[in-house]
Amino acid sequence: MGKAIKAGAKKKKTEITPYLFIAPQIILFIVFFLVPACMGIYAAFTRWNILSNELPTFVGLDNFKEIFLNTESTYYKFFRAGFKNTVTFVLLSVPFCIVLPLLMALAINKKPWGHKFFQSLFYMPTVLSISTVILIWYYMFNKNLGLINNLFHLKVNWVGAQPYAWFAIVIVTIWWTIGQNLVIYLAALNGVSQDLLEAAEVDGAGPARKFFNIMIPSIRNQLAYTFVLTTVAQFNIYGQPLMLTGGGPNNSTNVLLMVIRDLAFPSYGGNSISGLASAMALVMGSLMIVIALLQYRFIGERE
Amino acid sequence: MKKKVLSILLATAMTLSLTACGGSASTDGGAKPASTETPAPANTASGDKTIEFWSVFTGGDGDAMQQIVDEYNATNPEYPVVHRMMAQEDLYTNLPLAVNAGTDVPDVAINHVDRIPLNSENNIYLALDDYIAANGNITADKYNKAAWDAGAVNGKRYGIPLDVHGYLTYYNKDLVEKYCPNVLDDGVVTFDEIAEFGPTAAADGVYSYALTWARNEFQEWYAQLGGKVTEDGVEPTLNNDIAKKVLLDWKDNIEKGICTQDGDDPTNLFGQGQLIFLPEGTWMIGTLKSMGVNFGTTYAISYDANSPLSWADSHQFVIPRKDIDAAKAEGVMEFIAYFQDHSLPWAEVGQCPATVAITDDAAFQEMPQAFFLQDPSLILISDYKYYGYMVSALDAFVAEVAFGKMDVDEALATYNQQISDNIKNQ
């Protein structure tokens, strides 16, 4: 008995070391995530001008009532519109951001001549900042001078009319982010058991059969991981519509983060309306967590 | 055991180094590293001998401002000036935070005049009246009236004008000669005149005017027709027939090919000789010169030849709220007064210095924007406290309605309400 207690105590003592090692990360997490997140959640129940000296005033659920129940309110309209636009973008872009890099990874994985070059080429846009990306594409999409209209002899107003504005935003997003998932899939495909593939071949399985019955199950975890991360990333869309379309035409690309940002930090002056903005952000964040959990549940590892 | 001690040491060292980083970032107000580009120790506590000056100028205008500051410092003032340029969104976020925290507050800063009504109400500035009186050199007669008047709120002065920067109409002289040779005899082009020659030009694929920065053009035309953005200084009053007329006239001209189309780049069209009148900012002069167009400048396109009200804004010097001793405040006033006679570099980057002295300067008189200062009653500078909410709303709907993508009644109702709701919920 006494020995057991001693052993237990000793064991406890040694457990400090790993915590010390992760301490820097924990501190950063607390300072830059946990504390702001808690403040944001609290702010959702207040009325608060974040740039002023005044403390937030607690208003209970008023902000949520304004967003969800007051059909006459500006915020009711803009929250709904922003949410709808954000979901539209997620639905339009996520399938491409998963399938295209997967197909490209399959092609590169065959190791054709120059595959290293193409691998770097496809990854390259990922390192650019959003402003750089938008500047490049803004001129490509320009109605009068743009490469795209001139190349195909079109007169399309890419960023000012629908459905082209969504095309433009989705194309830019895919071009910008394709490399991230591509490298993950390449690494995953490298890990697919060659024995299994050869065995399948001996048994007469065609390429499609091999892909769906061996490759996909083998990279299931990576697919789940990229699916969740890509969805979360696309929910956070902000820079592309902000800089490319300005939220137009007719507010159809005015996504939720733009609505939230305009409320919390008005671009051209005016007091910050942080309470309502935080309430919207809290709703959006909670929904993203639910969606991510569902995705993990349905495609993640089943054990 | 040794291993454990080592690991604890390492982890502690890492933790400490991180907290040290964080600490230095938040408390560097007292002693800044010597490597910053300051001629003197940049201690911002009151009682030191430099003036900390924040500006929103980051492009060519930043260089021009630095040149004036350098020239001022070369006069060996008692309080030399340290000029810190930053992006305007950074300045407008940092200034209230610094003032409310009471640390790292600059001694003088540039603010757009449209920010002054709300910021003064939020107690961000010091009232300047006593300092101005003590200095004696800063008087209304030395400044452009429109800019000077805009710097005061409820009888208290918070801003001293640096410049007026406004929206002009640039015109292509060759195209004016071809399509409308006499319309500029009175210096103003009106919508009635455009209705006459516009269709002829449109038939040749030449636009008569352009949708550029829709919010400024809207404000000009709305004001020319007598529209008021607010009656009581609080509630917006944009949802009315005047606003509707401006938007529908505009839409009509776009549909007729008289005004530029959605997706067009008006500056480029102007450069290529496909646009007669380009409404644009004074700050575009350099760009247009580099395009090699034979251009002139005049007031805004107008509904009324007698009142071509033109939108403008003004950069103003403000003193953020802080404990500032009288001697240093006097140093700041001397610095501001220096601009009265030394603003020419500022004019050279396309601005209109707001001082009366500059209008007599021969070099300035030759600049395209010089006419803009002649009649302050034609300069439209907003004094609406909620200008920020209003222009965000204008950005969201004016061009959309003009290009036929949003219904005019719905847009005016929705966005007038947005401004109003923002005011209620702020």
Image: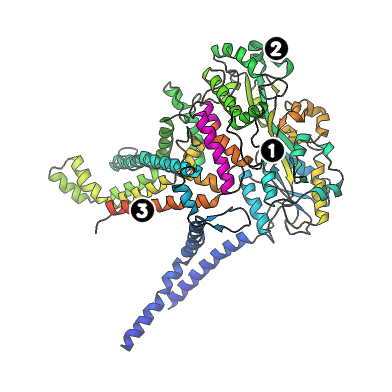
Disc 2 marks a residue whose amino acid type is Asn
The residue singled out by tag 1 in the image is B61
Q: Are marks 2 and 1 on the same chain?
A: yes
Q: Is residue A120 magenta?
A: no
- The location of residue A175, given as percent across then percent down, is 41, 38
2 or 1: tag closer to the N-terminus: 1
- The location of residue B86, given as percent across then percent down, is 65, 46
Pick whichever, A214 or A251, lies toward us. A251
The residue singled out by tag 3 in the image is A290
Q: Are marks 2 and 3 on the same chain?
A: no
Mark 1 and mark 3: span between their CA atoms? 49 Å
The residue singled out by tag 2 in the image is B182
- The location of residue B42, given as percent across then percent down, is 72, 56
Pick whichever, A219 or B107, lies toward us. B107
Pick whichever, B402 or A133, lies toward us. B402
Disc 3 marks a residue whose amino acid type is Val
Q: Is residue B145 above or below residue A12?
A: above
Q: Is residue B402 magenta?
A: yes
